[in-house]
Image (cartoon, grey):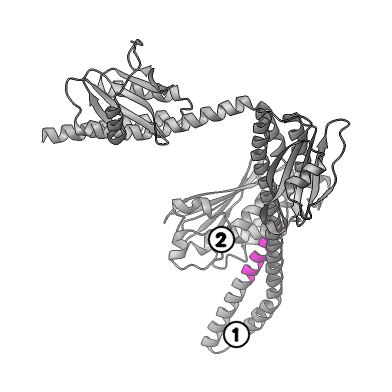
Amino acid sequence: MTDERGGWVDRRRRAESLERTMLALRDARETHAVLSTVARGLGHDFRRPCVAYELRGGTFRPAAWSDGNAQRAPFTLAPSELDALRLRIVIRREDDDVVAISSDGQLRALFVLERAAEPLPEDDVKYLRAIAAHVALALANALAFEQLRRLAQEGTALAEAAHVILGFTELEPLARSLCALALRLADADRACIYAHRGDALDRIAFAAARDEPALPERVELGDVDVSHALATAFGGAALIVTRLRLPREGGNIEHNGLLVVSRSSAFERSQLRVVDRLKSLAALAIRNVDLYEQSTNANRALEESNAFKDDLMAMFAHDFKGPLTVISGFSELLFDHEEPNVRRSAETIVDQARRLARLSDDALALAATQSAGFSLRRVPEDLVAFLQSAIEPLDRERRVTIEPPDEPVILAFDRVRMRHVVDNVVGNALKYSSDEVVVRISADDREARIDVSDRGIGIPVADIQKIFSRYGRGANVRSRGIAGSGVGLYIARKIVEVHAGRMEVRSVENEGSTFSIMLPFVALRLARGAPGETS
C-alpha cells in the first residue's frame, strides 16, 4: 500500500511539474529561454545537473545549464546513438541520461541529465518523453519567432509598407500605393499593375521615377505571350513580373493581375527578394479589400433585411390593434349575458385580445427601439402620480402597494415610453407572483429610483444576465409553461437607457425579484428650458 501511495505521489508530482513547464514555455519567444527554462526545471525535478545542448554548425554546443558550472565541452554522439535517440527519444549513455528534442523531423537540441548511478525508472522515462514533446513545440515556436524577427529587422521598410497598404479598403488606391512602394523598395524606374482581361492587359495603377515615360494603359496580347508583350511595352528593360490575385465582381478571385517592376540595369538578388515579399503583403492587402467589400455588402443586406423586418413587424402590430379593439368591444357587451358560460367565454376572449394588444404594443416598441430615429418627448411630470395612473389598470386584483417618498419627485420623461416600461416591469411582477407587489419611489440629488419587488418565482442565477436580451427568458418560466414573448424587458431597458438611465435586477429563485429603474434628473433641466422638447 505504501509503494502504491508513493507511486501515486510521484505521478502527481510529475504531472504538476509538467504543468509548470508547459506554463513556463507558453510565452517563451527565444530558443535560449526555452532551453534554460527546461534545463533548470529538469535539474530541480531530478536533483542532478542538467545541461541543454543546441545544434549549431553540426555540433551540439552547451546553451544552458542548471548548475553554476558553465564549463561544458560540446557533446558528441555516435551514429548508433543518434539513431537510438530518434527512435526512443530518451537513452542512457554511461552515467548520463540523454533526451532528444526534434522539430520538423530534425534533431534540434539535447538535454543531458548528468551523473546517475542507476538507470531511470520507466515512469521517469515516460515523463521525459512528455517533456520532450512540449519542448519540441515550444522550440519550434521560438525558432519561427526568431526567424520572423530577423526578417522584420531586415525588412523595416516592408513593415512600414505593410502598415500603409493593409489599411486600404478599395483596390485602386491600394494598387497605386503598391506601385509607389515597389518603385522605392526595388530602386526601380517604373512600376505598374495590370489586370489580365481576355486578350489584353489593362493598366489599373502606375508609378515612375522622374522623367520616366508612362506605360500604355492597354497592352494587346494578340498571338504573343504575356512576357513578350511586356518586354515590348517596357522597351527591353529589366523586369520583375509577379502574379497577383485581384478581386473581381461577385467576390470571385483569380490569378488575373500582374505587378510589373522595371529598371534599365539588372535587378540584384536583394531587390528580387524584396519584391517577392511585397507580393506577399500585396496578396494579403488585396484579400483584405475583397473581404471588406464582401463584409460591406453583407452588412448592407443585413441592414436592409432588419429594416424590412422591423417595418413589417410595426405594420402588422399596428394593423392588429384595430381588429383587436373591435373584438374586445363586442365581447365586453356579453359580460352582462344571462348565461354564465357565455360570460366566461366573453371574458376569455377579452383577456386574450388584451394579451394580443400587449404583444402588439411590444412589437411596435421593439421596432421603434431598432430605428435610428427613435426619440423621446420629455415633459416634466410628478413621478408618483404617473406611476399610480399607469399601475391602476394593471392591478385589477389590487395587489400592488406604492410606497412614495416624503417629497414630490418631478422628473422629465416621455410619458408614452415610460408607460411601456411600467407595463412590462410591473406586469411581469404581477404575472410571476401571486403575492403582494411593492413599488418604492425614492430620489437623491442625482437621480430618481423606482424599485419593483415581488415574492414570485424569481430568476435562476444562470439566466439573470440574459433576461434583458432580446427574447431572453428564464428557464424556470419556460418549464412552467408561462406565456411570454421575451422582449418586454429588452424594450424596457432600451427605453430607460435612451432616457440616460439604467436598469438592474436582484433575484433569488423561488423567493422573488426586485427590478430597479434609475432615471437621472439631468433630463429635467433640459425640459425646463424647453417644455415638450424632443431629443
Q: Residue at x 33, y 19 (%)?
A: 75
Q: Residue at x 54, y 58 (%)?
A: 472
Amino acid tagged 2 = Tyr
Q: Position of residue 308 (x, y in %)?
A: 71, 65
Mark 1 nearby-residue class (10 Å; few <14, some 14–19, many ≥20): few
Amino acid tagged 1 = Asp
Part of the protein shown in magenta: 357-370
486 relative to 178 in the view: left or right: left
- Residue 365 among those drawn in magenta: yes
75 relative to 93 in the view: left or right: right
Q: Which residue is disc 1 drawn over?
A: 336
Q: Residue at x 83, y 45 (%)?
A: 529
User: Does 523 appear above or below 431?
Assistant: above
Q: Residue at x 82, y 43 (%)?
A: 233
User: Does 1 appear above or below 345?
Assistant: above
Q: Which residue is disc 2 drawn over?
A: 471
Alpha carbon distance from label 1 to label 2: 39 Å
Q: Which mark is residue 500?
A: none
Q: Position of residue 520 (x, y in %)?
A: 68, 44
Does residue 239 show up? yes
- The quarter of the picture where the N terminus appears is top left
